[in-house]
Image (spheres, rainbow, N blue to C red):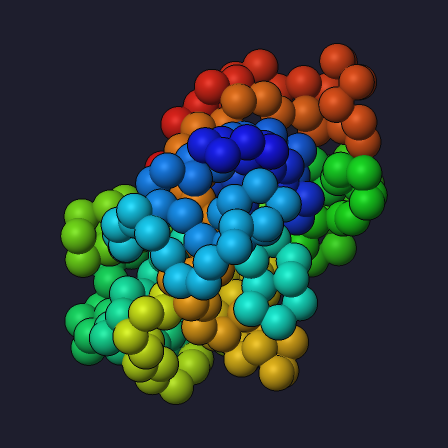
Amino acid sequence: RTLFFQPFWIPSGSMKDTLLIGDFLFVNKMAYGYSQYSCPFAMCPFSGRIMGEEPELGDVVVFRHPTTGSDFIKRVIGLPGDKVQVQDGVLSINGEVVPQTDDGVFVETFEPQGPAGNLPQCANPSPGLGADCIKEKFIETLPNGVEHSVLNITNTRLDNTPVFTVPEGQFFFMGDNRDNSTDSRVAQGAGGVGFVPFENLIGRADRIMFSSAGRSMLFFWTWRGDRFFKAIE
């Protein structure tokens, strides 16, 4: 962990297909300046944030969970003052529907993934081990023109939310794998992320440096060569 970049390994599928379990990336701490959480080992002797610019809609950000202290990685969906809502699985920001266009399906193998060996969630029911696990895929275009993919597995209670008004100095985050993401749609006291203070942001994820589909990075036969040095969109 350095003052400028911090390594981060993707342990879960909440950001598929933008980020896969086993992606290894460096987080750019200079993007948003410095707070106690972005300093090495959270040891900076000050509160608040210095030398920083706010993130933009669509940025993929690593942040410190406000209550658990765990590091999360999600996409910025709401800026201070924005009103965010999800209706029938479609995002709205400030009363305007965020357009989604069909982009086919995301297909992965139904098998244990990463060191934890968790099985992926699938839209197709009960695939056998080794079979295709399928999710619907869409391209979402945020109000500032940023395009990124989102996945849909099934209808869940988080496909319909109240309107969230993002407080000043805080941000609203969601995972791209919308039905398999613990994010700002659920309050911190209810097991979610809730609104995240600017101070808790560690840095922006810009590029995947390395990726391994296996239980260990040492298993070279599981390396994903097509993801080395891949830009994060």
Residue 28 picture location, percent across and down: 42, 35
Which quarter shows the N terminus? top right
Relative depth, front residue between 196 and 213: 196
Q: Which residue shows up at 35% across the image and 46% down it?
A: 33
Q: How many marks?
A: 0
Residue 62, above or below 88: above
Q: State whether residue 101 appears in this view.
A: no
Which residue is depicted at the point 81% across and 31% down?
215
Residue at 75%, 39% in the rendered image: 113
For the C terminus, the quadrant is top left
Q: Nearer the viewer, residue 42 or 189?
A: 42
Residue 38: image x %, image y %?
50, 47
- Rendering coords of residue 29 (x, y %): 43, 39
The residue positioned farthest toward the bottom in the image shown: 162
Left or right, residue 62 beside residue 57: right
Q: Quadrant of residue 48?
A: bottom left
